[in-house]
Image (cartoon, rainbow, N blue to C red):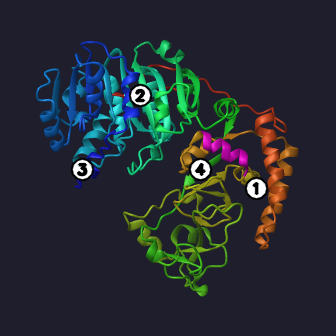
């Protein structure tokens, strides 16, 4: 395995970042410090400049880096270098050594062999083990002394992504998060981290959950240069209570939202899209080059495929048996809705082989994802997994939909046109950006979008406007700007001013909180 992929080590060569991170930790003489991924020793060098009497343990997995560190610090009796895998090290797993301070730049998304993947899955079963930096965050935080401090530079994805819910809840209940400094990875020119934004997190270990939840987190953003990190008056600073983050939807840090948007998302008396609709991902053949066909080669990304013959395209509705078992005739290509940010109406540009033979092969293939079959060929809305600056949704219209789509199928199908208008509104884009600031949507994020129930008049007005848009687009015209603006105004009034809401409908929920220890147990924040 390529060592660069194995270690995923990006050494922190930025002096302003080193100054900021070491400055956030209050070193005292004889502190015991851990650097869990030593690299070439840049953090250690910076610590020694101001605190030469501290005791530093350096852990490093890469043998060549270990050799360099041992040579570099051979005369420093206060420094020990250990060749070890931090995440599997006995002293870390058993917390047999506690530290006053921990500092580092843990590996991001390191590639592991199958044996290590299996082992990490057992040891850190409550966490998302495919992302190494969050495992470092958890394991090292556990090894802090009470009131010990940690400062890591990591990607910002743990702050909001659904897969990192467990680590967020652990940190929020077991530590006081002192400061989060957020900045673009472009501050490191020439280094491809694979992440758009980075975060420096500084926290203090605390067993007092009540103090932890009343702690105010300082959040610093909008730095123009990396040098501004060291200047407390630069960028934008805001504070948020740890409790408000924990009790919010998905315990996510919603930095990209206004206070009003965050309040709306976290209002537990408001329904969610997941309460009124099923949100599911679609079909994948396992070998699209064989089974998938574009209508012609003018379609984007169609060059690798064989075009569909018009006589092979099924033009009449499928029977229930054909939907489940395949088509026996020659016209066995069915339209499939794929990704791409097209609002309201997607033409039939792609077709999937739905013959009896193909269905048999799909079911036998290990690569095929024959998932959520109850929703194939139904009426719903397709939202692309990969979104641009604006969220879009288009009618599924009784077609197949593929895995690049989140299919939204209202439990009451009469809501399809209303929801179609909502998903294409600027309000919905603002809400989903706050819930998940990354460009990737999944069913879990769509489910979390608030659904403010409209009164009958507002619902009717929206449905009329959406029907006009759909009719216009299906006729080949594109002038829908007036309807789009009117819909934006309706949803802005509904969501942010309460104008047009049906106040008769509420949904209530209560939450109880306890301190989490994810290690070796299945503890979770309980939602009653």
State the image coordinates of residue 427 (x, y, percent, origin top left): 72, 44
* Residue named by callout 3: 113
- Residue 499 inside the magenta-drawn segment: no
Residue 207 vertical placement versus 88 (above, below): above
Q: Nearer the viewer, residue 322 or 282?
A: 282
Label 3 neighbour load within 10 Å: few <14, some 14-19, many 20+: few
Marks 4 and 3 close (CB-CB < 8 Å): no
Residue 20, disc: 2
Q: Which mark is residue 279?
A: 4
Q: Which mark is residue 417?
A: 1
Above or below for 363 versus 164: below
Instruction: Please indicate, yes or no, whether residue 528 appears anywhere in the rendered image.
Output: no
Does label 1 or label 4 sit earlier along the sequence? 4
The alpha-carbon separation of the residues under discs 1 and 4 comes to 16 Å
Nearer to us of marks 1 and 3 is 3
In the figure, 61 relative to 211: above or below?
Answer: below
Mark 3: secondary structure: loop
Is the stretch drawn in magenta largely helix, strand or loop? helix
Which of marks 3 and 4 precedes in the sequence? 3
Q: Please tell me which residue lies in front, 355 or 220.
A: 220
Q: Nearer the viewer, residue 181 or 493?
A: 181
* Magenta-drawn segment: 425-434
User: Between marks 1 and 2, how big is the CA–CA gap?
Assistant: 52 Å
Q: How far apart are labels 2 and 3 at the CA level?
A: 35 Å
The answer to whether residue 11 is above or below residue 210 is: below
């Amino acid at each position: 395995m390529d060592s660069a992929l194995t270690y995923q080590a990006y050494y922190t060569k930025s002096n302003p970042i080193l100054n900021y991170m070491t400055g956030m930790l209050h070193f005292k003489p004889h502190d015991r410090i851990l650097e869990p991924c030593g690299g070439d020793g840049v953090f250690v060098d910076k610590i020694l400049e101001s605190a030469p009497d501290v005791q530093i343990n350096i852990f490093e997995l890469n043998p060549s880096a270990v050799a360099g560190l041992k040579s570099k610090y051979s005369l420093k009796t206060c420094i020990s270098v250990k060749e070890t895998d931090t995440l599997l090290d006995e002293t870390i797993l058993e917390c047999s050594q506690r530290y006053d301070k921990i500092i580092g730049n843990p590996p991001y998304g390191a590639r592991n062999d199958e044996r290590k993947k299996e082992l990490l899955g057992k040891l850190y079963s409550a966490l998302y083990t495919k992302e190494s930096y969050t495992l470092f965050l958890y394991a090292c935080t556990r090894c802090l002394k009470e009131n010990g401090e940690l400062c890591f530079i990591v990607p910002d994805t743990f702050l909001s992504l659904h897969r990192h819910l467990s680590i967020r809840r652990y940190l929020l209940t077991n530590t006081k998060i002192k400061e989060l400094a957020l900045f673009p990875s472009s501050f490191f020119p020439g280094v491809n981290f694979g992440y758009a934004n980075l975060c420096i997190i500084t926290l203090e270990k605390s067993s007092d959950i009540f103090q932890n939840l009343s702690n105010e987190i300082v959040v610093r953003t909008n730095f123009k240069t990396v040098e501004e990190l060291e200047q407390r008056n630069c960028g934008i600073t805001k504070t948020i209570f740890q409790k408000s983050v924990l009790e919010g939807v998905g315990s996510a840090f919603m930095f990209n939202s206004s206070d009003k948007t965050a309040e709306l998302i976290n209002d537990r008396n408001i329904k969610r899209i997941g309460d009124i609709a099923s949100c599911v991902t679609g079909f994948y053949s396992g070998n699209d080059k064989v089974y998938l066909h574009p209508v012609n080669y003018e379609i984007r990304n169609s060059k690798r495929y064989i075009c569909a013959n018009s006589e092979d395209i099924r033009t009449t509705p499928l029977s229930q048996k054909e939907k489940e078992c395949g088509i026996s005739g020659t016209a066995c290509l069915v339209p499939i809705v794929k990704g791409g940010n097209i609002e309201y109406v997607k033409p039939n540009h792609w077709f999937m082989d739905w013959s009896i033979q193909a269905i048999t092969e799909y079911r036998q293939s290990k690569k095929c994802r024959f998932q959520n079959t109850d929703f194939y060929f139904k009426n719903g809305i397709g939202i692309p997994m990969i979104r641009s600056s604006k969220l879009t949704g288009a009618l599924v219209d009784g077609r197949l939909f593929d895995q690049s789509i989140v299919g939204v199928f209202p439990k009451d199908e009469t809501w399809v046109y209303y929801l179609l208008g909502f998903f294409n509104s600027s309000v919905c884009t603002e809400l989903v950006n706050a819930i998940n600031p990354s460009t990737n949507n999944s069913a879990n994020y769509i489910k979390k979008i608030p659904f403010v129930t409209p009164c009958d008049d507002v619902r009717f007005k929206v449905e009329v406007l959406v029907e006009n848009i759909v009719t216009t687009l299906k006729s080949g015209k594109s002038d829908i700007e007036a309807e789009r603006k009117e819909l934006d105004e309706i949803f802005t009034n509904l969501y942010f001013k309460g104008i047009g809401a049906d106040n008769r409908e509420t949904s209530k929920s209560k939450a109880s909180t306890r301190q989490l220890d994810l290690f070796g147990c299945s503890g979770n924040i309980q939602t009653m």
